[in-house]
Image: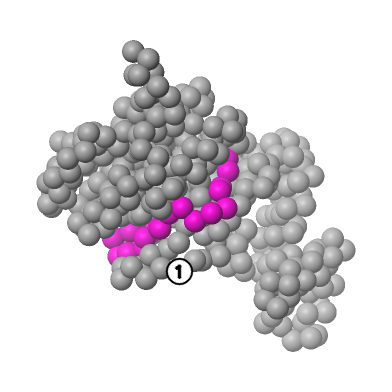
Amino acid sequence: MCKDKELKKNLISVVMSNYNTPIEYLKESIDSVLDQTYSNFEFIIIDDGSTDDSLEFIKSYDDPRIKLIVNEENIGLTKSLNKGFELAQGEYIARMDSDDVCYPNRFEKQLKYMKHHSDTIVCGAWAKTLDEKNNSTIEEWACGAINDMEEYRINLLFNNYPSLFHSSAFFNNSLLTKYGIKYNEKYTYAQDYEMWTQCSKHANCFIIKEILIKYRFHNTSISQTKGNLQKECVFGIVQDQLDYLHLVLPADVKESHIVFPSKHAKYNAEFKKWIKTIIKANRRYRVYNHKILKRLLWYYWSKVCYVEFSHYSASKKLFLIATLSPRCIMNLFRIKKYYIDKYK
């Protein structure tokens, strides 16, 4: 009995869903889980009605930690994940996609963090990106950080920023249960982003500043095959958050809104009005810390203006500066110094 209790302590439930994953990707992914330096885990693999030979490949593994669940028909990733989370017995749940790769010490590092931060509901990590030829790069956007939870909640009002990679997610199972959090099956193609919005309402989220996974981009990725549907899900998740501010996302600023915190956002006079509308609504309804929201949005807007400056002549730059507040002008100097220091 004591031995059983000890095995349950710090037990991790790894949840993976497979649907027709190429064998070379699936093998690398499964092996990277089984070869972890921390070994006290159950590995729940849900085969979601595969029609290729990937199910038989999974069955070829002889490891007692693997618990294979076979869906009679394809129900999709979101429902399969909820099924896996319901079956999970661990104190912690580690997500893993069937085409991504864990570094050997991933579970060890994340467990150590979570054991010392019981108020954290989900912990992610930095990632390297892989292409179809297994070429690996470290992208700037793959190495973000959550330094302040209120800032993170505000960023989530626009998109999944900074990136908390789904395959790196490591959950406190008791906190998920306490707050009744599961994947929203309405948002099939952006279930991770919606999950972060739920988690951030109730507890802390964190990203370990260390590369612990390899994240694969290929032709069958959801972002490649279902890009437009994924974008519609993102719009829906944004609108769910705007509901608390009693706002409706205007059609003419939709595209700008969901890329706003990043360097890819473009200068748009109508979007500047939209920022003011958000600030005004928050002043009334106090959904977010108003001081932080106002500071953050205008800082991001200053970054947009900074990028815009690079395309302007001297006279047009002066004209644009004349339209900015003193705070935004000060932000421009801060941003310029940041990029000078970064690339010198």
Residue at the right extreme of this rendering: 326
Q: Position of residue 97 (x, y in %)?
A: 34, 49
Q: Main secondary structure of the magenta part?
A: strand
- The question of residue 189 being in magenta is answered with no
Q: Which residues are magenta?
A: 205-224
Q: Position of residue 252 (x, y in %)?
A: 57, 60
Label 1: which secondary element = strand
Q: Quadrant location of residue 74? A: top left
Nearer to us in this view, 112 or 288: 112
**Which quadrant of the rendered structure holds the N terminus?**
top left
Q: Amino acid at mark 1?
A: Thr
Residue in view at x 70 percent, y 78 percent: 344
The correct choice, above or below, for 161 with respect to 339 in the image is: above
Residue in view at x 21 percent, y 41 percent: 47
Residue at the front extreme of this rendering: 3
The correct choice, above or below, for 55 with respect to 285 in the image is: below
The correct choice, above or below, for 2 with respect to 241 in the image is: above
Residue in view at x 82 percent, y 73 percent: 321
- The question of residue 213 being in magenta is answered with yes
Q: Position of residue 43 (x, y in %)?
A: 30, 37
Q: Horizontal placement of 67 versus 86: left or right?
A: left
Whether residue 335 appears in this view of the structure is yes
Q: Horizontal placement of 10 versus 313: left or right?
A: left
Residue in view at x 58 percent, y 43 percent: 206
Q: Quadrant location of residue 239? A: top right
Q: Horizontal placement of 148 versus 180: left or right?
A: right
Tag 1 residue: 137
Q: Quadrant location of residue 118? A: top right
Q: Horizontal placement of 26 versus 11: left or right?
A: left
How packed mark 1 is, by other alpha carbons closer than 10 Å (few <14, some 14-19, many 20 or more), is some
Nearer to us in this view, 30 or 139: 30
